[in-house]
Amino acid sequence: MMRAVVLTPSFGRHSDAPDRLAEDLGLTLERRTEGHPKSAADVVAAIGDAPAVIVGLDEISADVLAACPNLRVVAKHGVGVDNIDLGAAAAAGVSVVNTPGANAGAVADLTLGLILMGARRIREAEDSLRAGRWEVFLGTELSGKQLGILGFGRIGRAVADRARAFGMRICAYDPFVPAEVIEQAGARPADLDTVVATSDVLSLHLPGGDGVLLGAAQIDAMPRGAALVNAARGGLVDEHALAAALTTGRLAFAALDAFEVEPPPADHPLLGAPNLIATPHVGAFSDVANATMGTMVVEDVVRVLDGREPAHPVRPAR
Ligand SMILES: NC(=O)c1ccc[n+]([C@@H]2O[C@H](COP(=O)([O-])OP(=O)(O)OC[C@H]3O[C@@H](n4cnc5c(N)ncnc54)[C@H](O)[C@@H]3O)[C@@H](O)[C@H]2O)c1
């Protein structure tokens, strides 16, 4: 009997397609989703002797892999694998799989929503109306403005497609995507410093786990009145420097769907900063993405447990 422990409550939450597929393919699912995301010790206890685990942001460290000798596959219900020790998994012979592209449309939709919310000051206007006032709020139009995209993968390109429909010019930095591929997608390739220094809106769409990409120096180099959107990973941005840039009014707004520590502590300087739009890491939460992520992990778990190659393996960087 094939079985997998499910640690993320998101699996099959908005669609029964993943559970139906698992049943059809003979995969028994055991849900242990309380206390998500789980610490390493809780993950070990939850996995027990299972050969497969479906995770969200749960910690899959080298210690977890060492403590779960029966484990054959870790399936990420999502894209970012910075919570999984890929090197330790490869060394232990454990496959890691994820769901590339499944949530690109969902995250791109949210990103455009965040940009529009900040540019047209939608929340301020609504708060004002609900407070019994009838005021006007001067916004910024997107048409003709430059959107700088850091990380031109699936989500970055989906954001570019949508932003072009709003008349934005797209400039992108991605050292791993050839310049001609960026150009074919209708964007202008540029180095990091150029994208940061020239974009009206800067949006992050690259993996986390490799430290801060936008530190105080980069935030200072953004044009006065620019905006920053981060629906990737909180650790990519120096949050204290960002809070300072909002407080001084250097940046028009910042919109974050990801924080270095999630949830951010109530006294976090960003939460008290003006013109911050914040959402609780909901980028991937759409009906379509939820169904697709769930079915993709079920398919790949079954492939690995069957002794076949997974369709979406994730391997450590060379
Ligand atoms: N908010 C959410 O709910 C949510 C959901 C899904 C993904 N994400 C985040 O979005 C990220 C991107 O997802 P994706 O599906 O587009 O992944 P992807 O792998 O398709 O694209 C990532 C791109 O980032 C590029 N990249 C890697 N390192 C870089 C660097 N140092 N500088 C610039 N570019 C770099 C890669 O070359 C790649 O093209 C994920 O890694 C994850 O952190 C967030």
Image (cartoon, helix red, strand yellow):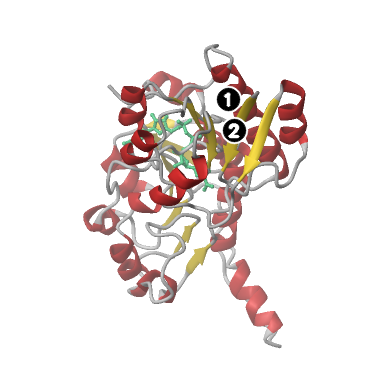
Q: Secondary structure at mark 1?
A: helix
Q: Along the horizontal axis of the image, is 210 left or right of 271?
A: left
Seen as rendered, the residue at the extreme top is 308
Residue 247: % across, % down: 35, 74
CA distance for labels 2 and 1: 8 Å
- Seen from the viewer's position, the closer of residues 35 and 98 is 35
170 to 256, vertically: above or below? above
Residue holding disc 1: 301
Q: Earlier in the sequence, mark 2 or mark 1?
A: 2
Residue at 26 percent across and 59 percent down: it is 220
Residue holding disc 2: 4
Residue type at the position of mark 1:
Val
Residue 255: % across, % down: 48, 59
Residue 3: % across, % down: 62, 30
Q: Are marks 2 and 1 in contact (CB under 8 Å)?
A: yes
Residue at 57 percent across and 30 percent down: it is 101
User: How many C-alpha atoms fall within 10 Å of the one at disc 2: few (<14), some, or many (≥20)?
Assistant: many
Q: Along the horizontal axis of the image, is 242 left or right of 310?
A: left
Residue 76: % across, % down: 51, 35
Residue at 36 percent across and 73 percent down: it is 269
Q: Looking at the image, is mark 2 or mark 1 nearer the viewer?
A: 2
Ligand 1 shows up in the quarter that is top left
| Residue 87, quarter of picture | top left
Q: Along the horizontal axis of the image, is 301 left or right of 156?
A: right
Residue type at the position of mark 2:
Ala
Q: Can see residue 165?
A: no
Position of the N terminus, as image quadrant, is top right
266 to 291, vertically: above or below? below
Residue at 47 percent across and 22 percent down: it is 313
Q: Along the horizontal axis of the image, is 92 left or right of 289?
A: left
